[in-house]
Image (cartoon, rainbow, N blue to C red):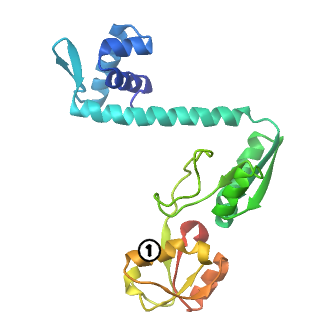
Amino acid sequence: MLDLTRLRVLAAVAEHGSVTAAAKALHYAQPSVSHHLARLEAETGAVLLRRVGRGVRLTEAGTLLAQRAQEIIGRVAAAEAVLAEHVGLRAGTVRLAAFPSALSTLIPAAAARMRTAHPALRLELTEAEPPEALAQLRAGEVDAAVIFRHRPEQGSGDGADLRLTPLGEDRLHLVGPAAKRWPARLDAHTDADWIAGCERCRAHLLWLCAEAGFTPRIRFTTDDYVAVQALVVAGLGMTVLPELALR
């Protein structure tokens, strides 16, 4: 495992352009910086720096590792900040808005851990789709919100006034009746009937089908994932569901 201190040293050399400047920025003695760099090269088995005149220059491997080091350092700093906030929680009420499938899958385990770690904290849960959850957050009606967006470029309504922390990714699944054999490709179902959510909850289905070259013929509309799956089992159509809804 790569040592975080040595990664910080390499990142400092990349940022400041020399061993001397990196040592000054880190408040290290120059021999200490050189020692850390030598140990890092030994750990990686790669030449990270080359002497150029009186200075040094990062090799291609050194540049690549320095970039990754900056990412790692940033994530560690973010984790430390989150942990500091977490440790600082003692008592009071935390109001959380979340979409339905998150409330039934992700939130219970997190709420149980929070109660164990902070028994004096009270958690208030509100079911809300992302637009409503963000509106409640901005209005001060909740303290945090668990939301989703289907594509990275899709705006979720977050802006400079909110801090967005990615929690993970959820895969989308093409769902059809188990009693029938059918191709696991969207473009093989251009003539199928489809089951979808309401107008604001079917964006993922519409853009996936558009990318496959067709517009889905939506015969049934419901936001209840249990009802959606029951309709599929009855052979009344196909659908696309997030993995959280299938747990």
Label 1 Cα crowd, 10 Å radius (few <14 / some 14-19 / many 20+): some
Q: Quadrant of the C terminus?
A: bottom right
In which quarter of the view is residue 70 placed? top left
Q: Position of residue 57 (x, y in %)?
A: 22, 23
Q: Disc 1 residue type?
A: Leu
For image coordinates 60% across by 72% down, the residue present is: 200
Answer above or below: position of 57 versus 201. Answer: above
Question: For this view, does 108 lie left or right of residue 35?
Answer: right
In which quarter of the view is residue 134 placed? bottom right
Answer above or below: position of 176 versus 89. Answer: below
Q: Which residue is mark 1?
A: 208
Q: Quadrant of the N terminus?
A: top left
For image coordinates 45% across by 73% down, the residue present is: 207
For image coordinates 73% across by 45% down, the residue present is: 114
Can you see residue 16?
Answer: yes
Q: Position of residue 135 (x, y in %)?
A: 69, 57
**At numbered mark 1, what does the secondary structure look like: helix, strand or loop?**
helix
Can you see residue 184?
Answer: no
Q: Position of residue 216 (x, y in %)?
A: 47, 85
Q: Position of residue 58 (x, y in %)?
A: 24, 26
For image coordinates 70% across by 51% down, the residue present is: 138
Answer above or below: position of 221 versus 166. Answer: below
Question: For this view, does 247 lie left or right of residue 50?
Answer: right
Q: Nearer the viewer, residue 160 or 36?
A: 160
- The residue lying furthest to the left in this view is 53
Q: Nearer the viewer, residue 42 or 81?
A: 81
- The tally of labels here is 1
